[in-house]
Structures are given as structure tokens and as C-alpha cells.
Image (spheres, grey):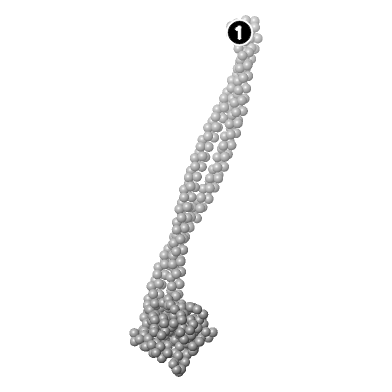
Amino acid sequence: MCSKTYLLTMAFAVLMLCGVSAAWADSTVERLKDEIQDTRQTVKQQKQELLKLTREERSMFGELASIEDRITSVERDLFRQEDDLSGIMEDEQAAKADQRVLEAELAEIVDKLKDMLSRLWPVHSRKLENRFGSLDDWAKADRNFVWLASLYKETRVELDKAQKKADEITANLGTQKDLRMKAESKLAEINSTKDSLLEDKLSLLAGIKSIRALKINREQELKGLLETINKLNYRLKSLTSKKIANFKGSLPRPCEGDTKVRFKPSAKPPVRGIGIQTTGNVDVKSIFWGKVVHNDTLRGFGRVVIIYHGYNYYSLYAYLAESFVKTGQEVEKDEIIGKTGYYPNLKETGLYFELRFHQNPVNPQKWLARN
């Protein structure tokens, strides 16, 4: 054990001679401050970009609302125009029905006239041949002539009346047709306007969707940056205001298990750390924030990781089956740094753990939290 203790003491002395001291903490603090400043600047730029996207989105929503109002107005016009067209078509059908009635009446009048003329024509012909008969029958001839003239006149009146009605119906149908054509033209124009507005609406919706996707991306990036700032501030605080000395008695145990070897520097040979027996290969965690200054095998202690915690405090983890960190790597409190391996003195898996101030070992049991 003396040779092992000597090797550990020499290892810590080498670390001290290599300049691993509070200077590392100071340089890390400055680097963290610069990193926080750079990240804050990026956050500011991201917020400006997000604000720009939000304004653009609001503008597009305003345009969308305007288009939707116009679409509503056009749809109202469309409904009115459809109603007008429906009314015009109903009037047209009614006019066609009236025309059929009038045409039937006209046909009936014509048939009557044909019948009348077929019976009157022979009489008329004989009168013309007899030159309206003898003077003795003048009174009778005059009555016949007056009767025929009256009948012809009445027939002409009916014919003129029927013709006039037919002309009115024809004109009315022409008017209805013109109105229907205008209504259909207006309907097509309104539909075209509506289609154009719907295309504009779809275009705006696509633009809004694109902007929203960019916003979500920017918001996620911003969230990540803010989380990074929080983590950097956390690390900075741990280096500037959280000194390991302030956590004496409350540091977490480096692994789960039972303490089988206790700190006895006065023993023969001296024991400058503690031995923890574990059930198999369990996780080994850093007891505090720090920087890995050693990650290699050390004769008599297997794989050893040494972490510098600033202000000349070190923690040592020996008999590791494997380590997950590299020399120069910064680690967090409770970060897993490796797995426990075979502990020769215990003849079981376990961890040998030391805590040192400068090169002097201190009792880890006074620093670790009690179970």
C-alpha cells in the first residue's frame, strides 16, 4: 500500500507541477463569459428575425382578412345574381307558355276565318258577277255589302290584335334572352373574380404556412440558445460562486454501494481514501464540477480518473473497468465518468475514491453526503 500511496502522491505532484491550478478556473470563467456574450448576441439577432417574421405574418393575415371580406361580398353578389338569373328564366318560361296560348288562339281565329271565307267567297263572287245585283235589290245588296265589310273589318282587327300580341311576345322573349345573357355574363365574371380571390387566398395561406414554419424553427433555435445560456450561466456560477469547499458534507457519493474501506491516514499502511463495494459494474459519477486532468492506468490502481475542481481540490476514482471521459474534458456535477471494475483488496467490484487539497488527502466521509 505504501508504494501505491507514493504513486498517487507523485501523480498529484506532477499535476501540480504541470500548472493545474486556479489559473484553469480563471481561464474557464473568461471563456464561459465570452461564450455567453456571443450566444446572447445570437439570441438578439434571432429575436429580431423572429419579430420581422411576426410582422410579416401579421401583414399577411391582414391581407387574408381583406380577401376573405371580398370573397364574402362576391359570394353575396353571386347569390343575388343567381337569384336574378333564376327569376329571369322563370319569366322566360312563363312568356313561352303565354306565347303557346296565344299561338293556339291565333290558330283558332285563322281556322274560323278560313271557314267564314269559304262560305262567303261564292256569295262575294256572284255579287261581283251580277255587279251587286239589280237596282231593285239595292237595299238587300247594300245590307250584304255592309255585313261583309263589317265581317272583314272585325277579322282584320282580330288579326292585327293577334299579330300585335305575337310581336309583343317575340320582343319580350328577346328582352328575356338579353337579360339572361347579361346575367350569365355577370355570373361568369363574378365566378372568375371569386376564383382569382381564392387563388390569392391559397397563395397567402401558403406564404403564412411557410412563415409559420420559419417562426417555429426560429423559436426552437431561440429556445435552444436560451437553454445554452442557462447552462453556461450555470457552469459560470459553479466556477465563480460555487466553491467545492462550500459543499462540504453535501457532495454526492461517487457511486452506489457500501463503504468497506475507511479513511485512516495513520494506519500501517496508511489509507488516504475510501473503498466502496458495488454490485457489479455500476456508474461512477463526478462529485462536483471540474476538469479531467488524468485518464489513464496507474500501476496498482488500474484505470484512474483524476478531476480538478478548482481552488486546488482534486478527486480521484480508481479501479475503473472503463472511463467515458477524456483528459482536458470539463464535466458536470453527477456526470457519469465511467464504470466500477475489480477491486483487488475487496475481491469484488468496487471503487477506490480519494479527495485531496493541494497534495494532501482529506477525509472523503466528511465531504460526502450521508446515506
Q: Position of residue 208 (x, y in %)?
A: 46, 58
Instruction: Report the quarter where the C terminus lies.
Output: bottom right
Q: Residue at x 59, y 25 (%)?
A: 162
Q: Position of residue 40 (x, y in %)?
A: 41, 72
Q: Position of residue 158 (x, y in %)?
A: 60, 22
Specify whether residue 241 is in view.
no
User: Is 17 placed left or right of 251 in the picture?
Assistant: left
Residue density around tag 1, few if under 14, some if 14–19, many if 20 or more, within 10 Å? few
Q: Is residue 160 above or below residue 6?
A: above
Q: Between residues 22 and 264, which one lies in front from this camera angle?
A: 264
Amino acid identity at mark 1 = Arg
Q: Residue at x 61, y 14 (%)?
A: 118
Q: Between residues 164 and 362, which one lies in front from this camera angle?
A: 362
Q: How many marks?
A: 1
Q: Is residue 357 above or below residue 235?
A: below
Q: Between residues 56 and 348, which one lies in front from this camera angle?
A: 348
Q: Which residue is mark 1?
A: 126
> Which element type, helix, strand or loop, lies under badge 1?
helix
Q: Which of the 4 image quadrants contains residue 237? A: bottom left
Q: Position of residue 47 (x, y in %)?
A: 43, 67
Specify whether residue 35 is in view.
yes
Instruction: Report the quarter where the N terminus lies.
Output: bottom left
Q: Is residue 126 above or below residue 103?
A: above
Q: Residue at x 44, y 65 (%)?
A: 218
Q: Is residue 166 above or below residue 5?
A: above
